[in-house]
Image: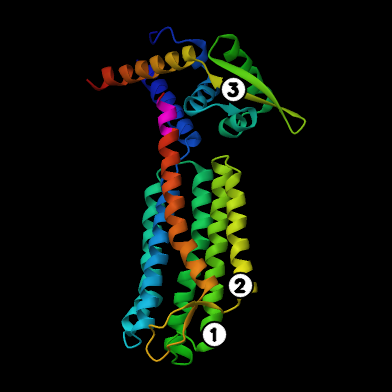
């Protein structure tokens, strides 16, 4: 009897491990999309609030220091909750892409932090031209990451048209940057700057990295539910 | 199905792994090889046996000038698998009580 029980346990473990290895989980992927979408949206709102009310330094401090820390905490929570699934391919995907996506804002936060305390005593927000350059780099890296994630989704779901969308998204940003430069939509609400403009590429980048992640997250969630439904049939 | 009369399909770990892999969706030969970590020859032999016994079906498609075999669990295979899992559960439950 003991041998039978031992064999039964062994077989159940084999079945469980194999099913977990072959099962595809998308939960972490869409949670990451919602997390990054929320992060980008909050950051944009805080930056815009700071532009409208330059004395509200707290908005910029939250955007530069607190939000990346919360983003990192959110990512760790998602990764830990997904770690129980033993699908190594899925975990590596979440790990590699997630680390890159999180490393950029967290790295920027650390640089600002070090600048503030160690080197120049600067508040880390930069001056005019460095601010524009930093904004360009942030937007470009954000769109690039979004496009990479879309390409990963295209291969995961066998939906090759997503590759086209990813390339179009990136190409659109490049065209806007090279064709229009710093030209943009009039934004006369900034105190003392009645002729201020929000560059087209900046607006485009923020729309893609805020709304784009939410749309992609909803798409992945819908896809997962669809596949779960197929499995039950 | 009872504990003294387990079908041959479940008596070898590799066959059990193959069937478990196919529960969620169909898989190609290479995907099965990655999941089971079996050698090409051994996997091929076990797949042929399972197909002969009616647990799985295979289909071949030509993709980029190469033949790709895809394997799928039959309804008979799925019902036998469910029955086997229920049997394992019963064995463990009887030991617990």
Res A34 label: none
Res A130 label: 1
Where residue A2 sits in the image (x, y, percent)?
35, 19
Q: Residues within 10 Å of mark 1 (few under 14, many from 20)?
A: few
- Ranked by sequence position, the earlier of labels 2 and 1 is 1
Between B73 and A152, the one nearer to me in the picture: A152
Kindly report which numbered mark, 1 or 3, lies closer to the viewer in this rendering.
1
Where residue A61 sits in the image (x, y, percent)?
36, 80
| Picture quadrant where residue A11 is located | top left
Disc 3 from disc 2: Cα separation: 49 Å
Of the 4 image quadrants, the one containing the N terminus of chain A is: top left
Where residue B45 sits in the image (x, y, percent)?
65, 17
- Find numbered disc 1 in the image and state the secondary structure of the residue it sits on: helix
The chain to which mark 2 is attached is: A
Callouts 2 and 1 close, C-beta under 8 Å: no
Q: Which residue is mark 3?
A: B71
A12 to B54, vertically: above or below: below
Region of the chain picked out in magenta, as a range: A228-232
Disc 2 from disc 1: Cα separation: 17 Å
- The residue at the far right in this view is B65
The residue drawn where x is 36% and y is 20% is A5
Disc 1 from disc 3: Cα separation: 57 Å
Of the 4 image quadrants, the one containing the C terminus of chain A is: top left
Q: Residues within 10 Å of mark 3 (few under 14, many from 20)?
A: many
| Picture quadrant where residue B42 is located | top right
Between A208 and A187, the one nearer to me in the picture: A187
Callouts 1 and 3 close, C-beta under 8 Å: no
The chain to which mark 1 is attached is: A
Q: Which residue is mark 2?
A: A177
* Most common secondary structure along the magenta stretch: helix
Residue A113 visible in image:
yes
The chain to which mark 3 is attached is: B
């Amino acid at each position: 009897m003991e041998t039978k029980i031992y064999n039964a346990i062994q077989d159940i473990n084999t079945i469980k491990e194999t099913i977990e290895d072959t099962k595809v989980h998308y939960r972490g992927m869409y949670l990451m999309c919602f997390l990054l979408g929320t992060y980008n949206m909050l950051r944009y709102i805080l930056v815009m609030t700071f532009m409208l009310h330059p004395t509200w330094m707290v908005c910029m401090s939250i955007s530069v220091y607190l939000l990346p820390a919360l983003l990192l905490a959110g990512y760790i929570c998602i990764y830990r909750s997904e770690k129980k699934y033993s699908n190594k391919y899925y975990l590596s995907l979440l790990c590699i892409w997630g680390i890159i996506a999180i490393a950029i804002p967290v790295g920027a936060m650390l640089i600002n932090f070090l600048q503030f305390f160690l080197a120049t005593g600067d508040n880390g927000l930069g001056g005019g031209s460095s601010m524009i350059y930093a904004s360009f780099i942030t937007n470009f890296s954000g769109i690039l990451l979004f496009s990479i994630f879309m390409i990963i989704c295209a291969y995961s779901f066998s939906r090759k048209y997503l590759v086209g969308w990813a390339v179009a998204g990136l190409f659109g940003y490049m065209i806007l940057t090279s064709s229009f430069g710093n030209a943009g939509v009039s934004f006369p609400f900034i105190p003392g700057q009645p002729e201020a403009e929000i560059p087209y590429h900046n607006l485009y980048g923020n729309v893609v990295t805020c709304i784009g992640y939410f749309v992609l997250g909803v798409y992945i969630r819908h896809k997962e539910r669809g596949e779960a439904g197929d499995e039950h049939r | 199905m009872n504990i003294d009369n387990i079908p041959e399909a479940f008596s070898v770990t590799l066959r059990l792994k193959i069937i478990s892999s196919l529960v969620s969706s169909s898989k190609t030969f290479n995907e099965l090889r990655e999941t089971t970590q079996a050698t090409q020859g051994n996997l091929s032999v076990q797949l042929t046996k399972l197909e002969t016994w009616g647990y799985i079906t295979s289909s071949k498609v030509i993709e980029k000038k190469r033949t790709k075999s895809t394997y799928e669990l039959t309804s008979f295979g799925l019902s036998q698998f469910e029955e086997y899992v229920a049997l394992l559960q019963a064995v463990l439950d009887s030991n617990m009580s």
